[in-house]
Image (tube, grey):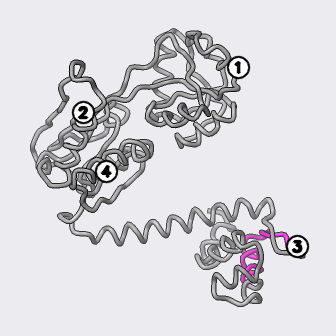
Amino acid sequence: MHDATHRLLAALRMRQLELISTLADAGNMRAAGQRLHLSTAAVSKGLREVEALFGTAIFHRLPRGVVTTAAGDLIVQRARVLLGEVAQLADELAAHGMPADQGMRLGAPPFIAWTLVPRLLRDLAAHGGLPPVRIVEGRLADMCQKLEAGDLDVLVTMNTPSELGGLRPDGFVIEQIGVEEWTVVCAPKHPLAADRRRRHAWRSLRDEAWILPPRPTNARMMVEQVMLQHGLAPIVPRIESTNAITNLQLAEQALGVTLAARCVIEDRLRRGTLVEIGMEDLPAPVPIAMVYRFSGAHRGGVSALREAAQRLRSAATPPEASPSSSTRKFSARKSRA
């Protein structure tokens, strides 16, 4: 760490971050002081102290209030992230004290937590079986570690080597509860949206401006795999973002094309903010799975969630086309975690 970092770590306090975040929201020192139960003079003094720590002006002082400087925009943004992390930590610590038999701890990557998990919980509630639930979102590697350590009861995610390949299988069940299709989308005003009946070859999209997550995320690996299958070099995205929603918002601004799971874009397709690009072939659908301990298969929350998943799958698949549920039971030995 360099000297400036040491100085901030030694002197910066969370209360100071709260002050600049509140001041940015309020727009003037009097209103900020009222929210923080401080005098206007105390807010002004506190701001000077924070600006001295950062060595730059965070706000322009104007006759009718304050507005962030260019550096202030960055500082306030990062302050809010840190404050949010502290609030989340407090919530997680409070939830950590909840007895395991009084709630279900459910892990999922963000796009599954935004789309499938609400549907599962809504179904549980409709059938009178919704227990207290603590949802944990994050990277799959972290989720698998939490599952192995016993900090999660069940994980809902894509079942691919890149997603679950790092899970140590001892004592776990991977049960398929659905499949997710992929599609390539762009904004309605993007040139590729002009002829929606046309079927595009991947070669024709090779040099398009792509918006993709970084390696080794599943969507990125899917695109690279299909390019290799067509004898094409990997894509160098114009924009990379780890957040699926951010990627879709960028695509809506006609900044490029992106590959997305259909469950994430259904609402945008209905509203017309994104359109599908017809492709000659797309990556194969990916199984969606529930992962839980063999020993916990009959726990109330996990058992009810499995039943909800089965109901949703049955409702989405015509009976004559409904495949049998795929369940893989690994060794029932106790996990090494």
- In this view, which residue lies farthest toward the front? 126
Quadrant of res 314: top left
State which mark lies toward you, 2 or 4: 4
The quadrant in which the N terminus is found is bottom right
Which residue is pictured at 49% across the width and 14% down the height?
Answer: 228
**Element on which disc 4 rests:** helix
Q: Residues within 10 Å of mark 4 (few under 14, many from 20)?
A: some
Spatial separation of the CA atoms under disc 3 and disc 2:
59 Å
**Which dot marks residue 121?**
4
**Element on which disc 1 rests:** helix
Spatial separation of the CA atoms under disc 2 and disc 1:
38 Å
Spatial separation of the CA atoms under disc 1 and disc 3:
45 Å
The residue indicated by pointer 3 is: 62
The residue indicated by pointer 2 is: 176
State which mark lies toward you, 2 or 1: 1
Please state which amino acid type lies under the numbered disc 1: Pro
Q: Is residue 54 magenta?
A: yes
Give coordinates of residue 138: x percent, y percent.
Answer: 42, 50
The answer to whether 223 appears left or right of 108 in the picture is right
Which residue is pictured at 19% across the width and 43% down the height?
Answer: 307
Spatial separation of the CA atoms under disc 2 and disc 4:
17 Å
Give coordinates of residue 48: x percent, y percent.
Answer: 77, 80
The answer to whether 281 appears left or right of 255 in the picture is left
Q: Earlier in the sequence, mark 1 or mark 3?
A: 3
The residue indicated by pointer 1 is: 191
